[in-house]
Image (cartoon, coloured by chain):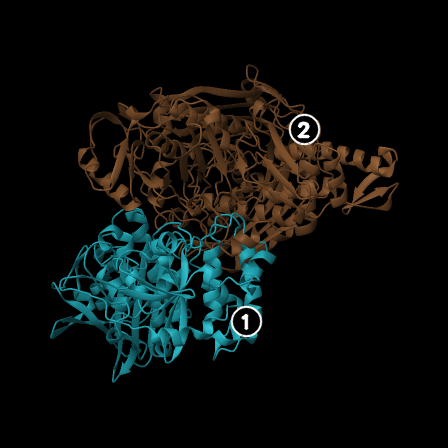
Chain colours: A brown, B cyan
Amino acid sequence: MKNIDSKNHVTGKSVYVDDIPVQTGTLFGAVFSSPKAHGKIINLNLSEAESLEGVEKIFTYKDIPGKNQIGGIIEDEALFAEDEVDFIGQPVAFIVAKNENIARKAVKLIKIDIEELEVITAPREAQEKGHLLTPSRTFKMGDVTKEWSKCDYIFEGKVENGGQEHLYIETQGSYAYPIDNESIKIHSSTQGATLVQKIAAQILGLSMHRIEVDVARLGGAFGGKEDQATAYACMAALAAYLLQKPVKIALHRLDDMQMTGKRHPYSSDFKIGLNKDYKIIAFKTTMYQNGGAANDLSPAIMERTLFHTTNVYFIPNTEVTVYSCKTNLPTNTAFRGFGAPQGMFVIESAIAKAACQLNIPTSKIQKKNFIKENDEFQYGQIAESANIDHCYKTADKTYHIEQIEQEIQEFNSKNTNYKKGMAVMPICFGISFTKTPMNQARALVHIYQDGSLGISTGAIEMGQSVNTKMIQVAASVFSIKPEKIKIESTNTTRVANTSPTAASSGADLNGNALRIACNTLLERLKGTAAKMLSCDISEVRIKNETVLRNNKKTDILWEQLIKTAFLDRVCLTENGHYITPIIHFDKAKEKGHPFAYHVYGIAIITVTLDCIRGTYEFDDVKIVHDFGNSMNTIIDNGQIEGAVVQGIGWMTMEEISFGKNGKLLSNSLSTYKVPDIYSVPKNIDITALKTEGPELALLRSKAIGEPPFMYGIGAYFALAKAINAFNPNYKIDFDAPLTPEKVLMRLYQK
Amino acid sequence: MITFILNNKLVQTENHQGTTLLDFIRYEMNLPGTKIGCREGDCGACTVLEGIIKNNKVKYKSIVSCLTPIGNAHGKHIVTIEGINMKELTPVQNAFVDHAATQCGFCTPGFVMSLTGHSLSEASSDKEKAIASISGNICRCTGYKSIEKAAESISELLKVKDINDPIKWLVDNEHLPEYFLEIGKRLNEIEKNQLETSENAQIIGGGTDLMVQKPEEIAETNINLFYDRKDLKGIRKVKESIIIGSASNANEIMESPVMQEYFPDIKSYFKLISSEQIRNMGTIAGNFVNASPIGDLSIFFLALNADIILKESNSTRRLPLKDFFLDYKKLNLQKNEYIESVIIPIPQNEFYFNFEKVSKRTHLDIASVNTAIYLQLKDDMIEACTISAGGVSAVPKYLNKTSAYLIGKKITNGTIIKANEIIQEEISPISDIRGSTEYKRLLLRQLLFAHFIKLFPDNISLNELLS
């Protein structure tokens, strides 16, 4: 089944926040933000801007009736700066005017005097000076200090990874207006409807029931709208509430890029010890996370980094530490992978360094250390259905890894101007919010008396086709045509207290809640059918919109069944509530069973490097992926392709650049490049690993959103190999992204 | 009053000529299918089609509405996604559905319009061309593989297209609504009054630079639209020269039979310059006047020894392009003067030309370094040589000394190594977002090598150059 929105997408009829027809009298907002990265606000002069014709009002923290606080996990982030600014782009004031142009003009008329303070942009410097967002955390297994002496080989190194701009094509935006009963309705391009509701209520000093948040769909998010959509929704809500008028804001791209946070850059040290059989005995890493100016989701991202520092390997002795460092940059936030890619890049770098020094193929170390059934992850969970070895063997059988290596060697021996490189990138990604209470969801199902269905869940559609999967769930439980089912917008008045649609868990959590609701309704309908047929309920089934009795068709069709049930006063509405069972985690011990299951897979990436120009093209990405029992291969394959390309982008051309003064230099699409149609791999081949799939996955179909992003990490190592094939003086180093500039410098480094 | 046909409807507006077509479409005409992604022509989400009458036919091309001053729509047919929607999906729309080439959907209308523009072209279709038509559209969800498949399937369908009358064929085959058949007639009927302009007005061509740099200013100041000035269009051979009208856009230059005759690889060079939509808009004069040290067309034409004709009311003067660039963003251009045309001498027998560009992303990006070379050989000796390079100086650089050095030399590895030494003295790159000083120096050396390796593969090799 294809994405149910497809037809509306291709005809331009799908409605995003900025497409909602505006009410008469709607005002438009623009944000005035700090021009300095750190300092005390001495004076803020709004008078000239206020007197501009068409400006309705300018809001600052002083206008907030509730609490000037938007921090999700930790309350350390103001909606509007009060006395101090901590990064360039930090909102200071919100201008509301008759149209957007006037609002934007007024922004330029605001004057601010700032007494500048020291600007720190590098995480290690922040850590040295004691600027941490939260206390550091360490995961440990075994005892590394004792084990170093038992290692035959020990390698140390440093790893840098860059940030990444989400570049959802739809920028942040919101439309808010007053409704009855002193309430506010907010349309927001957010992944977290409840978060917007809760924080807006806090800002306005209202109870949550006065705030209704509605989300139809997002034009891309990738984590960038999990927490960071909130501020703009709150600004629109604040102005709408205080002026009692509709207010809209849609960020311009440059503002969005300057003001919003990105994927976290990390700077890391590692030490890895192996025995002579290439078994990894001990691994230690200290990682400095560049959190930006406030916490946002950094503590949770730090946690997921810790979980994934051993990627897909069993390492008996580990000690991994992350410092979440406070810098004068926009507050970094969730991005597909949520800290795991940074962790995996470090362990893969450590293995690549070891392989390079030992002059053996990296895959030799990788496959020697794959986690096996019943091995323990460093956080205490026991590996179940540890499919990585199976993935590798399937990949080898399907794609012939050694043959690819030989072909590349042959090519390289014959060519000077071009070199090829190849890398194997295995992945293991835990599914569940690592914060256990977030693993809950609800769904509301209405069966209307004509037999059609309206379904609301907490899941937000942002291109991942979660709505399509919801339809599949309901259609399969009732055995009715998908056309009978409509997925409603995500709305806090229909489904309350939702978790954000994030952590790849949207389909699992909401789909299971929906399945529960549908099953309850199904039982009721079977009761009606049994009554109609004067038989026992156990004899009744519904198949293809027809009631079966003892597997034989009856005359009762779906519509008739529903009509009868309605007239018989059967409740045709049901709410489903789902919590992920089993999972738990003890933060005091840093041990537990945080994940419902793991997703495994492996990618083989090959690249051709133009050694004259330092440019490169990816030839192939060949993947074996453990989908479980995929409920929708079209959608799941699409998620893999998109994730791989985004991952390759992170490792290659996507380079975030800040000046020392904290100003974003890569602040537009002309200076920050994401993959275009010509820069993607020529071929992406996906093989599904045949497995049953875990019970805790929706219909045994594993979560898909984030894990394949990490296949892209292989791009770095494939490129490094190709560089080394041209320039033997180049010893692999780890400084992503590997842009054409860095590649050329390394090709000709002495 | 600005008058044009928007989809199936005649619209007239008193809006300032410099306001964007995008905002007009979305917020005044309430057609929200055209999306806002970046407002700088770098994502394609706002792509629409522009139809104009040429030789009694309506010809369409894709443009980005975010950079189109609405005055440039005057007298034309502008088509948004709503303007191609019919009761059933068009084959292009169907292809996106069938190949699951849409995820969040936000970029999708832009892709559909670009590909529909490809369908409307009066040329045969193949996969490569279909993909080229969407090269200016960014999708952040799909990873493009599904989009490639959709484009390929459309190119298959278009194999039997009547390239002499694509509109009729497309209407007959339900790619387009029927009203397209009447557009030619209706455009002819529009009273195309000259839009008002004034002395000292800011000249604007396709808008691909000014609308990025200062859209608010353009929306309010007096502007003088050059984009459709017939007197500034056309590419023709006159005696020993090729004369290019200054309002010619990059695609018109690339598609010109005269240019293709002398530069058979021009398409591969121009593919490195911006994107389909931007090449459909940006003019050669705009690229020169922008004075960017990295302007692709400036570099390309510097190596061709181009002259420019500068016009001011009734007087004209001819200036070598290399003398046009004085310093960073400073031009040898008087107030009220504008470029009327660009003249390049017809290349002589046994000439060689090459253009190289490296950027962070190979396509739709601004160069870190670009360079072009023109060589004439006689008896194995270099008889004439011009090399230009961008991104290595405050201006698009004519490499005077290096060019002079190469004249009279044989093409050997040693000569090229020496040429590089001279280049390194001639240039003064700075570190910026496009790369560090060291990188740009190394890159220009490499691109110099690339010129010769590509043009003289038998004489020159990377190994020899490096040894």
Give residue B419's quadrant in the image.
Answer: bottom left
Q: Residue furthest bottom?
A: B239
**Taking B221 as reference, is B152 above or below it?**
below
Q: CA distance from mark 1 to mark 2?
A: 53 Å
The location of residue A391, given as percent across then percent down, is 67, 42
Q: Which residue is the site of mark 2?
A: A383
Give residue A410's quadrant in the image.
Answer: bottom right
**Mark 1 crowd level (few <14, some 14–19, many ≥20, 10 Å Cα):** many
Residue in view at x 40 percent, y 75 percent: B184
Do the dots labelled 1 and 2 sit on one chain?
A: no
Q: Residue furthest front?
A: A567
Residue in view at x 51 percent, y 68 percent: B176
- Mark 2 secondary-structure assignment: loop
The location of residue B32, given as percent across then percent down, is 43, 52
Q: Nearer the viewer, residue A52 or A421?
A: A52
The location of residue A647, given as percent across then percent down, is 50, 44
Q: Are marks 1 and 2 in contact (CB under 8 Å)?
A: no
Q: Which residue is the site of mark 1?
A: B158
Q: Amino acid at mark 1?
A: Leu
Q: Chain of mark 1?
A: B
Task: Identify the disc placed on residue B321.
Answer: none
**Taking B197 as reference, is B434 above or below it?**
above
Q: Nearer the viewer, residue B97 or A581?
A: B97
Name the mark nearer the viewer: 1 or 2: 1
- Mark 1 secondary-structure assignment: helix
Give residue B426's quadrant in the image.
Answer: bottom left
Q: Amino acid at mark 2?
A: Ala
Q: Nearer the viewer, residue A564 or A318?
A: A564
Report whether B310 appears left or right of B156. left
